Amino acid sequence: MGAVAMDAPHEQPIFSPNIFEVGAGCSWGLGHGPTLSMNEWFIVGPGPGVYREEWLRDVHAFREHIRAGRGQILIMNGEQEDAWMCPSDFLTEALGLLPGDALYVSLQARVIDGESATLQVFFANSGPRGQVPVESAVMTVPGDGKRHEVEATVIVPATTARGAAPRPVIRVKQTGEPMRLEVSGCVLGVEDTERMAAVKRALSEHEGEPLCRGIYEREDLAWAASAFTHYFVFVYDRSFYDPVQGYQVNRFLTDKAARFGGVDAVLLWPAYPRIGVDARNQFDFFRDMPGGMDGVREVCREFQEQGVRVLIPYLPWDKATRREAVSDEEMMAVMLRDLGADGVLLDTLSGATEAMRKAVDALNSGIVLVPELCPTVEQLGLCSASWAQWAHDPTPPGMPLLKWLEPRHTLHYTRRWDARHQWEMNTAFFNGTGMLLWENIFGTRNPCASEDALLWKRAAAILRVFQKQFTSELWDPFYPSQDDDLYIHRWPGAPTTLFTLRNMGEPIKYGILIRWQLPPHVRADDMQVRDLWRGQMMRWDMTEFGWVQLWGDVDDVGCIAVTFGDDPRVDELMASQAALNAPDSEAAETVTPALKPVERTAGAAYDKPPRGMVLIPGGGASMRIEHPRRECGCYPDPDTDPSDARRFTWGHPHDGMVTHDYQVDVEPFFMDAAQVSNRDFQRFLKETGYAPRHAHNFLRHWPDGEMPEAMADLPVVYVDLDDARAYASWAGKRLPTEAEWQRAAQGDDGRRWPWGNDFDAAMCPPAGASPMPVRSLPEGRSPWGCYLMAGNVWEWTESERCDGNTRFCI
């Protein structure tokens, strides 16, 4: 029931946030029939004791109510003080309650956690709604989990001043025990026909808006419904960008076609986790990619020429870096236009804003917005695809909530840190939706097992060929199965109808899978039944009562095609599916980052240090380092068993800590006492004529490439690893290794800071300040006399590592 006029109980009730205000102890959700159960991701299929016909009735009614802007429920948490609800201002005004009025209150509710719920009904003129006056009524909802209609009548206090507009409040009485109440409707009424007519008019004016699904009718956005395979491209992966040969789009796509059957869209990811090291913002990282914006635009064009769409990320949390002259929404629209990209991944967000949708549409066509987190139903009007990351599929299996409400909405399942991906691939294919493939997680390699890659290669081929059926309103979910552990979706079409199968039990070997009554208008001898998953013909027979039975095998997932007449699509797909061979091995090899060997340089006599250098005596460097894990992990300690390497390299849990603890024997060496200055680097350039391979941002702090004299003694910055190595080679030196740098800073006693164990702000440059001259703060030098080893600027080392895909250096 809902807040409706008492003289019109036959009309569709209204119960929504437009009609009722609620306290912080309440939250709105989606209402549904008694046979349905759901979480934020899935609608649970009909389980034991639930008749499919009743379940279908409820699930179709649920969809129609949500599309019509109805079907809301309210969850009231009895453990919180602010678990209350009351009519909104317009409804309170329409009721026009007067002193002495008898207000009838009816609630439809059920207890979902706890023994029972007691509700207090009282009037509030002003002040805290949690304060219950003496004049109150009580309603009790039994704790049996069933829906109950509870009623009460409460009298408006005679002491209420006329014109005060008393507002009825319904509050959960706290008992100290955990309790949650689900309210699906509320009726308020008085014995006054004229006032109830006013209530009826007010409710009709504030009825909820229908769910907006107009973006699915836009031709420029239709590509999202057929992009089943998205691939996360960490742009520093050598399979995508080679430092010598440049961008490798063709090689990249050839590899993905061989392993996964191709990709439909890629997400180019350049900023995180590097962002924050300097002032560059998320947009600067695209500008600073090799070739600049022109280079990235050419990459987008190459992908699109081969039918692959390109998405870029929006990082809403990027607030502490350099600001643009326009809003983030406007800047995203400009970046999309300048790159010619096709969509936006909304990082850490569960949806888009109207401002983002309007901004990108103003400058671009065909831009799909894709939230990383689970979107609300209302987001179907703004985002035509979304990630389903760590989505929890219930038992028995469910179907995607958003896809049921709008079949053209494509979800992309992913569990980035899982070693195997059968679960999300099986879920995605069974429900006719997509996958996000993610093998380089911000620098940590987690390759997809060959068996999983083949699984998705089979699935994606079927999804692409029959895309229209997998996005059709005719979807017939949880079709009757002949095995208790086998779940089936039916996807009607002409001349071919598909059945996707998911087996949650032991493999089925030559069993009856499906049985149905052959329609009277079709001929059995026109029917072909094929196992589209394996590319094999299937046996079928007909019982004496006219039932068709399909026999076959199912391991985890499968697909059956029933064709009346000819369908060349099925013929071609059968041949290609049958040709797919099983992989050589099940597991994908994860390569531990390997340290690049360091070439020694010519030595010098210990008693004659080269100019500007200090002697660092040989000895043990204590590499006890603790740092946040973040989502990229770190390299493992030396001699770590490969089976234990993930303790370091894995970026999960991202908010944990990584602790390194090992000793390195370091031979004596000389090291510059101070960082390389701009004056030093200027002399190197003049004597060698050095020019970097990538000039973008090289010595960006020198105006027009000329060093200002005022910068001469400041440390040189805006040099990459190749530039630093070139300078060191010219000077007859090399960069220090990580262990050498650590020993030079720490000395023999394992101190926490170069000057001792206690932090002293006077010994190091202040955080966020401009760089100091390279020989500043001599009192803060390390035990061996090295300057500014805590702060000032970042320093390159020679400790370069590579796992075959990602190259990084300390």
Image (cartoon, rainbow, N blue to C red):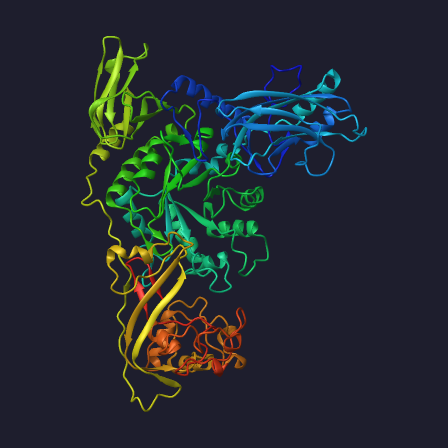
Query: Which quadrant: the C terminus?
Result: bottom left
Residue drawn at x 45%, y 48% is 341
Q: Furthest residue to the top?
A: 545
- Is 308 left or right of 158, judged from the image as shown? left
- Is 784 left or right of 664, judged from the image as shown? right
Q: Position of residue 77 (x, y in %)?
A: 55, 35
Above or below for 586 versus 595: above
Q: Nearer the viewer, residue 342 or 181?
A: 181
Q: Position of residue 441 (x, y in %)?
A: 36, 52
Residue 408 appears anywhere in the view: no
Q: Nearer the viewer, residue 280 or 810?
A: 810
Q: Furthest residue to the bottom?
A: 607
Query: Which quadrant: the N terminus?
Result: top right
Residue drawn at x 44%, y 77% is 756
Above or below for 366 versus 773: above
Q: Position of residue 585 (x, y in %)?
A: 19, 45
Q: Position of residue 180 (x, y in %)?
A: 52, 32
Residue drawn at x 71%, y 19% is 190
Above or below for 510 versus 453: above
- Is 577 left or right of 692, judged from the image as shown? left
Residue 629 appears anywhere in the view: yes
Total numbered labels placed on residues in the image:
0
Q: Nearer the viewer, residue 234 or 573?
A: 234
